[in-house]
Image: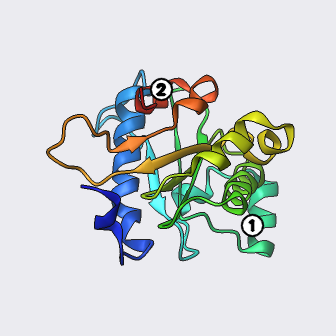
């Protein structure tokens, strides 16, 4: 499916699809040890939820630091999707923030995604759009000091609806970002 299929769709129509996709990415490409359902150590891992409407489950709130929780109550900051992942059973929870946009990615949205990463102390921060990011903006955030500061460690990706075209990945990352993409997402870098 091409990005034309996304025309007219609202941003919230992508939340559940992207949440499910990211749960699979972390489960398959990152987690190395897990407890099984029914075990006394079982915890949903990864745990992602749609937070765009300002509702955070107690499970997610328990992953926040006390300072973050206090500032969160004051600022009412809400990424579109948020959660955590644990690489191993005894590993600390690594926070995940995700900003979803339905139009081509703008620099201000990269800055917003980085703000969420900084505000929550998230290890993983993603900015995903079915339109992706145009090449001149890619060059800016890769080739300039100011652009690199704006981006930080935000993973910028294009979301494609699943299709019968086996050459098209559901998540695509521009190859110019390949040196700064963490391992679980390297397989999504376009060749």
Give residue 133's position: percent from left, percent from top: 55, 51
Tag 2 and tag 1, C-beta contact below 8 Å: no
- Counting every numbered tag in the picture gives 2
Q: Which residue is mark 1?
A: 72
Residue projecting furthest to the left: 164
In screen coordinates, is 2 left or right of 179?
left
Q: Is residue 159 above or below residue 25?
A: below
In the rendered image, the quadrant that contains the N terminus is: bottom left
Residue visible at 59% across and 38% down in the picture: 93
Residue visible at 42% across and 58% down in the picture: 130
Give residue 17's position: percent from left, percent from top: 33, 58
In screen coordinates, is 183 left or right of 4?
right
In screen coordinates, is 178 left or right of 119?
left
Residue visible at 28% across and 40% down in the picture: 168
Q: Residue 88, can we see it?
A: no
Precedes in sequence: disc 2 or disc 1: 1
Q: Nearer the viewer, residue 145 or 124?
A: 145
In screen coordinates, is 75 left or right of 53?
right
Give residue 187's position: percent from left, percent from top: 41, 26
- Examine the image and state in which quarter residue 69 appears: bottom right
Which numbered tag is attached to residue 51? none
Q: Is residue 46 above or below residue 119?
A: above
Q: Which residue is mark 2?
A: 186
Quick one: label 2, few (<14), some, or many (20+) residues within 10 Å?
A: some
Q: Residue 149, can we see it?
A: yes
Q: CA distance from mark 2 to mark 1?
A: 32 Å
Element type at mark 1: helix
């Amino acid at each position: 499916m091409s990005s034309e299929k996304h025309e007219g769709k609202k941003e919230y129509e992508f939340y559940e699809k992207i949440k499910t996709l990211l749960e699979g990415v972390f489960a398959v490409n990152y987690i190395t040890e897990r407890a099984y359902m029914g075990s006394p150590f079982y915890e949903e891992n990864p745990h992602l939820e749609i937070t765009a409407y300002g509702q955070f489950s107690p499970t997610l709130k328990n992953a926040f630091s006390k300072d973050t929780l206090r500032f969160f109550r004051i600022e009412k900051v809400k990424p579109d999707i948020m959660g955590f992942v644990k690489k191993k059973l005894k590993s600390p929870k690594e926070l995940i923030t995700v900003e979803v946009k339905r139009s081509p990615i703008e620099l201000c949205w990269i800055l917003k995604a980085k703000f969420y990463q900084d505000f929550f102390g998230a290890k993983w921060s993603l900015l995903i759009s079915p339109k992706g990011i145009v090449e001149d903006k890619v060059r800016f955030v890769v080739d300039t000091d100011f652009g690199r500061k704006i981006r930080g460690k935000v993973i910028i990706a294009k979301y494609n609806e699943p299709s019968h075209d086996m050459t098209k990945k559901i998540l695509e990352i521009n190859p110019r970002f390949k040196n700064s993409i963490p391992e679980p997402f390297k397989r999504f870098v376009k060749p």
